[in-house]
Image: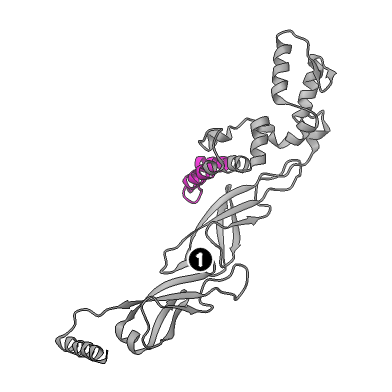
Amino acid sequence: MEYIDYYKTLEITKAATEAEIKKAYRKLARKYHPDLNPNDKEAEKKFKEINEANEVLSNPENRKKYDKYGKDWKHADEFEKAGYDPNQQQQQYSRQQSGQDFSGFGGGDFSGSDFSDFFNSMYGSGRSSRSQSKYRGQDFNAELQLDLEAVYTTHKQSLTVNGKNIRITIPAGVENGQVIKIPGHGSPGANGGPNGDLYITFIIANNSDFKREGNNLYSNVDLDLYTAVLGGEISVKTFDGKVKIKVPAETQTGTKVKLKGKGFPVYKKENQFGDLYVTYNLKIPTKLSEKEKELFTELAKLRNHGQ
């Protein structure tokens, strides 16, 4: 198996933090995503390599094994049970090459041929029953970018992952940054082992007039002076259409009203919704006619006289 430098693949150093690994992966995954590079085999290959590198380095335990055992990190548990240390192994092999005796590995003595047999068995040689062990395939990570309107309803969507087209159901109410696991759609297992899983991170863009916080939505609605003072009925936009609500007389600017059940769908809970909170912004009339000015002047006098 060819050694792949995962740090080089993600264009980071071995000292990179978890946050730096995540940032590098997202940047490169977007750049080489098959949807953005149709029919580009090189981009597709690069995208696979990026996902593989991220799968290993984003997992602290896997990263530790990779740093120690390189391309054979998946066999780390077997190596450690056998007392195999790659650093010590290299030192002893160097001594053997320079004509020194090789001894003491694992508490016994090994000749050059003995060492070779042991080394090969540890690396999956046909002479070892370990090569028949089943290994689970690596998990894949992908990002799916959608707008807020798209996740208001449950729908199906096709996407390309590692060169394969899959069709998934996206439940209503998915949140920005949420991760969903698709079992069995990762890398194939070895020696008949199970496939890895696919983890999809959702990036939700909000281009609507609403602010979303969890299952609740927030919006601002302009309220004219006359309705605010005298009361009345206005039409308010919700995410799935308009509704009419009553405005009490003498409503103040900044008043917040809750429209129950007019928010965003609750994830995987059918027919359950959050609430919509509407905040009134009072609109002062402009370009008054002379008659309107006279009337407002009269109103001002009445108010002052009453006080």
Placement of 118 over or under 18, stated as above or below: above
Whether residue 133 is visible:
yes
Three-letter code, disc 1: Glu
Circle 1 — which element?
strand
In the rendered image, residue 279, in percent from the top left (x then y), is placed at 41, 75
Tell which of 148 and 305 is nearer to you.
305
Q: Which residues are magenta?
A: 22-50
Residue at point 64% right, 32% down?
67
Residue at point 71% right, 25% down?
86
Residue at point 76% right, 36% down?
77
Q: Which residue is mark 1?
A: 213
Tell which of 24 and 259 is nearer to you.
259
Image quadrant assignment for residue 219: bottom left
For the N terminus, the image quarter is top right
Q: Is residue 192 magenta?
A: no
Tell which of 291 and 54 is nearer to you.
291
Query: In screen coordinates, is 286 left or right of 171?
Result: left
Q: Residue furthest top?
A: 99
* Crowding near the residue tagged with mark 1, few <14, some 14–19, many ≥20 C-alpha atoms within 10 Å: few
Query: In screen coordinates, is 269 left or right of 12?
Result: right
